[in-house]
Image (spheres, grey):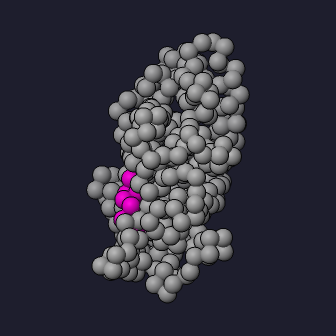
């Protein structure tokens, strides 16, 4: 299996790399053939479906009480292996196409189509830190809490960061929506924090969820700041996280210095996590989320996920048997109202996507 994820160094690896990347290239062409509005709406719908499923599946896998074969760090490894199997070859192809045209920046052994500075910045927040924080959160807190705190914290952090670094003004409608979201977050997170005095540990998961949301919001604002192309940003995130996290964690597993079970887990579970967490949550969702940012902007993009809390909480009740307590239900209502009010009352500001690379001469296009 190790040879599958080795960096291609010979020309014979090119056909296999192209086959694995062909689906992503086809998706890129499909997005480009749509109007900006249609592409933005489709990207939002795809993101919502994957994010809702992500919350339920991650909790079902990481919760120790459910007897899953993988721990949170194992799931993060599966996420990066699954995504890397597609995006590393795709990055290799993109970099070589840029070099053939005499354009573009590259880094990380010629696998990231962005400069090292941009790759490391977005990869740290959107790749390594987000995965480690969010999967560990599901060890302590139920999916219902994640349904409120993950999408609920995103508009808060994004609005703050966008105002601080992008100079975006928080309008009165946004402020009203954010106030409702704060109330919902306090109802959910505050109650678990009070139970900490009785020995409860749910507050740890809530804190991890909110910190993970901060990391993802940081990535979304960085994507807007650097005007990143969706595919290039997702490739860069994966390449950085792959080279930083995978070798270090695999060595720790081989030395048995960490209690991971990745090497001994049933391959069916490993393959499923690689497919969903890697291909779905990283490749498809990563591209669709960045496309959404390009059309709607970072603040409205996070607010467009208004249906995620309700869908995820309902799914947790139906599929995981989690109770829907009064504070969770009321917090869910407040967060959803806050997100919806921010979307309906704020104007749309479409943004034309720009690739972080010198423009291609017209004669070479």
**Camera-side residue of 174 and 186:** 186
- Residue 259 lies left or right of residue 273; in this view the side is left
> Residue 21, image x and y in percent?
66, 31
Range of the magenta residues? 206-215
Q: Going 60% across and 33% down the picture, which residue do you hit?
A: 85
- Front position in the image: 261 or 120: 261
Residue 128, picture quadrant: top left
Kindly identify the residue that appears in the image at 58 percent across and 52 percent down. Answer: 69
**Position in image of residue 252 (x %, y %):** 42, 37
Dominant SS type (magenta):
helix
Q: Reply above or below: 291 against 245.
A: below
Is 270 located above or below residue 211 in the figure? above
What percent of the width, then of the height, locates residue 213? 41, 59
Return the x and y of residue 67 as percentages of the image width and height.
58, 60
Q: Quadrant of residue 317?
A: bottom right
In the rendered image, the vertical position of residue 195 relative to residue 76, given as above or below? below
Q: Is residue 128 magenta?
A: no
- At a point 47% along the width and 75% down the height, the residue shown is 335
Left or right of 14 on screen, residue 78: left
């Amino acid at each position: 299996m190790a040879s599958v994820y080795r960096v291609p160094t010979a020309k014979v690896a090119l056909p296999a790399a192209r086959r694995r990347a062909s689906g992503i290239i086809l998706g890129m062409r499909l997005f480009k053939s749509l109007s900006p509005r249609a592409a933005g709406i489709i990207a939002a719908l795809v993101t919502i479906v994957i994010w809702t499923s992500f919350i339920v599946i991650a909790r079902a896998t990481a919760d120790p009480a459910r007897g899953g074969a993988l721990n949170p760090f194992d799931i993060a490894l599966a996420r990066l292996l699954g995504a890397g199997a597609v995006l590393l070859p795709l990055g290799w192809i993109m970099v070589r196409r840029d070099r053939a045209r005499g354009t573009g920046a590259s880094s990380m052994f010629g696998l990231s189509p962005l400069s090292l500075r941009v790759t490391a910045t977005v990869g740290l927040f959107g790749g390594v830190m987000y995965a480690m924080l969010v999967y560990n959160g599901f060890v302590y807190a139920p999916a219902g809490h994640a349904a409120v705190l993950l999408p609920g914290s995103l508009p808060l952090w994004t609005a703050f960061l966008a105002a601080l670094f992008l100079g975006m003004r928080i309008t009165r409608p946004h402020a009203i929506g954010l106030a409702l979201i704060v109330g919902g977050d306090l109802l959910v997170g505050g109650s678990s924090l009070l139970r900490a005095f009785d020995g409860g540990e749910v507050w740890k998961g809530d804190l991890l969820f909110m910190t993970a949301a901060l990391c993802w919001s940081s990535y979304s604002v960085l994507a807007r700041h650097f005007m990143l192309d969706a595919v290039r940003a997702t490739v860069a995130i994966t390449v950085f996280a792959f080279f930083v996290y995978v070798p270090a964690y695999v060595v720790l597993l081989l030395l048995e210095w960490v209690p991971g079970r990745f090497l001994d887990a049933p391959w069916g579970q490993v393959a499923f996590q690689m497919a969903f967490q890697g291909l779905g949550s990283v490749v498809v969702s990563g591209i669709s989320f960045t496309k959404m940012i390009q059309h709607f902007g970072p603040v409205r993009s996070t607010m467009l996920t208004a249906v995620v809390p309700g869908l995820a909480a309902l799914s947790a009740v139906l599929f995981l048997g989690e109770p829907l307590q009064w504070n969770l239900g009321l917090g869910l209502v407040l967060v959803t109202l806050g997100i919806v009010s921010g979307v309906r009352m704020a104007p749309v500001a479409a943004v034309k996507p720009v690739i972080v690379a010198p423009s291609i001469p017209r004669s070479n296009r």
